[in-house]
Amino acid sequence: MQTHPFLLKIRSFLSYRLFTNLLFVLLGIIVFGVLYGNVKPKTLDINLYEEAPTTIRAPKKFVDDEATVKKQLEAKEEVGNVYTPKEGAIDNSISLLRSLMESVKEVKKETETQEPGSEELKPPAEAEINEQLKQLKAKLPKDKNNNVTNQLNDTVLKTLLEASEEDLERVETIVSTQMKIIMENGVKEEELSEARLNLEQRITNYTFKGDLSNAAVKLGNVALEPTQYFDAEKTDELKRLAVANVQSVEIIEGGVIVEDGELITPKEYRIMKSLGMVENTFSFRPYIGLALFVLVVISLLYYFFYTLEVTEERKQNYLILTSIVFVISLLIMKIVGLIEQLEINDIAYIFPAAFTGMILRILLNERIAMMMVFILSACSSIVFHQQFSGSIDMEIAIYTLFSGVSGILFLVSRNQRSNILRAGIYVALVNILILAFLVLLSGTSYSNSEYVYYLVFALVSGISSSILTIGFLPFFEAGFGILSSMRLVELSSPTQPLLKKLLTDAPGTYHHSVMVANLAESACESIGANGLLARVGCYYHDVGKSKRPHFFIENQLNMGNPHDRVSPETSRDVIISHASDGADMLRKHKLPKEIVDIAEQHHGTTLLKFFYYKAKEQGKDVKEEDYRYPGPKPQTREAAIISIADSVEAAVRSKKSPTQGEIQQLVHSIVQDRLQDGQFNECDLSLKQLETVKRSLCETLNGIFHPRIEYPELKAKGEEV
């Protein structure tokens, strides 16, 4: 990748670190500015009790706390009190009644008197009644919670003491029977008064002597007790469960708050007010949130490029290119977002989400492309946020993410523009599937026309992504000097002017270049280097020979060797100059720097041994450095491998029917000679990789120069064959 001249001027005034930091700051400002309008609070000009001018939807999920609390209170009130049955309550009440009556009978027996000579009992005197009353009170229970003496006054007790045994038996039977009937139907604690009133009505239906009716009622009131007691703990537990089971009253994102033309009631107005839709109160919170988002994005980019293992210059070029593509994508997204505000529903799905990933994968690499797709999908959730700020659209984020990732994955081959268009079609199919997933998941019913719109949006998104990629690609290649795979394929075409010239003027060199290309490409791919770059570089590495083609042996067909007629110094100058001549020709035709470097570096600073020793044999005082190529030495693995393949191909071709052993020995000796000469000192080619390269070269050469069957000559016509 070459640096643009304008950037070189800026860098001449700034250090690399300062220049990079300024780029990140500028990118952050641009991203914040583009997204600013999407977080800026927007409100509706509506008032309470007005008709809604349009259907108003919630920009984000809203939980109505006030309505939820009201619903919880209603659920709490619906829970009835829990009562716990009291075991043996009826038996206890009847036992208490029987005990009272037994006490009365015992006192009466203990104090009863008879007239002498008479079987009839003598009615007790007043004093005697008082004494009986005193004894009866002593016998009655003194429980502090149910003190009978406090509930049965003296009048009632005297009435019982004055009554006959038969009357007492009748009172006991009637009261116990009626009390049992009432208690068997259940008597709650708070219903005790009502139960006593019911008992009183039942008792008064019977006829008693004197005041026994009143005494019977009093006895029933004393003995009657609740059969079910209020359980506060269980009641509270049920109320808590009822409240917990109440679901929050909420409106989902995009849910209707009020329909078009409906009256805006206090409830709807309160909801819109809570969502910040009707009162434009300034707040820094949205801007702080956006600033934090931009900070995270820039921090991720900074860390990614900081850890990128390339030169500072290349790193900055990558950053500039990535930033430009990112900003272009944001601007396209913004334009689509503005169109969406014209009430064209869901037009956001027409956004060419795969464009960013596809073009960055072609120009740079998959890691950068994948990272930017994730960042862009997050930005899309902010830009396409329905009607109001403060919300994000997760559906469009998912759509953008899958579309972008599929664009990267489907771009398997980047060598032809037709592959980009094919990848765009595949992306469109993925878009359709993702949209179908989102539509079906929402459960919303759509009309047939809406389904057609979604289909069109998905297709346009995928195909427009490939069209934009194809359209922008030449500009980025030219502006940044990027040597993409497609550019390399174009340069490998025999119709290129320099290759046509080489084929016409130096056919032997052209054939030699093709053979070297086959060797270098295989060797580069065996160690993970750029095989396509090596192949195309080989096509052009000897283009300088077309200037004086007959001075090179591969072009000397049926003619004398011109080197036999010139001095070694002249031969040296002609041979050595083909590298610099080729580089100049390539620069003149504006070929990429990588191709120029290969032409200039493929001989490094090697010694032109043949003419060096020829000059020494002629007795001339020569210096070794005068017969060396000017260099520079190979700076990349591709240039180093091409330098080996160039020498190996020429050496093996000079042999007649070389064996595998001879080929292996030639390759080994040439590599060792280059190593000892220090030709690989300036490139990142390891010894282990060199061994792999040697094996690859031997395999390819063995395939080219394998032994062939010698066919017998055909006999003349008429002879036996």
Image (cartoon, grey):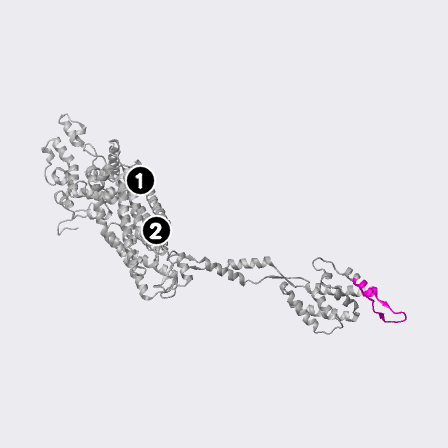
The residue at the far right in this view is 117
**Foreground residue, 384 or 692?**
384
From the viewer's perspective, tell me whether residue 509 is left or right of residue 349.
left
Q: Nearer the viewer, mark 1 or mark 2?
A: 2
Residue 339: image quadrant is bottom left
**Foreground residue, 531 or 178?**
178
Q: Residues within 10 Å of mark 2 (few under 14, many from 20)?
A: many
The residue at the far front in this view is 126
Query: Disc 1 residue type?
Result: Glu
From the viewer's perspective, tell me whether residue 554 is left or right of residue 519.
left
Check disc 1 and report its element: helix, strand or loop: loop
Q: Is residue 163 above or below residue 569?
A: below
Residue position for label 2: 378
Q: Residues within 10 Å of mark 1 (few under 14, many from 20)?
A: few
Check disc 2 and report its element: helix, strand or loop: helix
Q: Which mark is residue 390?
A: none
From the viewer's perspective, tell me whether residue 423 is left or right of residue 94.
left
Residue 131 on the magenta span = yes
Instruction: Please state the horizontal and vertical placement of residue 549, each as a whole percent of the image.
Output: 12, 40
Of mark 1 and mark 2, the one earlier in the sequence is 1
Q: Is residue 541 visible?
A: yes
Q: Which mark is residue 309?
A: 1
- Residue stretch rendered in magenta on the structure: 108-133
Instruction: Please state the horizontal and vertical placement of residue 546, each as a whole percent of the image.
Output: 13, 41
Residue 679 on the magenta span = no
**Foreground residue, 561 or 498?**
498
Instruction: Please state the horizontal and vertical placement of residue 427, each as a whole percent of the image.
Output: 30, 55
Query: Disc 2 residue type?
Result: Ala
Q: Is residue 426 visible?
A: no
Residue 553: image quadrant is top left
Q: Residue at x 90, y 69 (%)?
A: 116
Instruction: Please state the horizontal and vertical placement of residue 154, each as a whole percent of the image.
Output: 75, 64
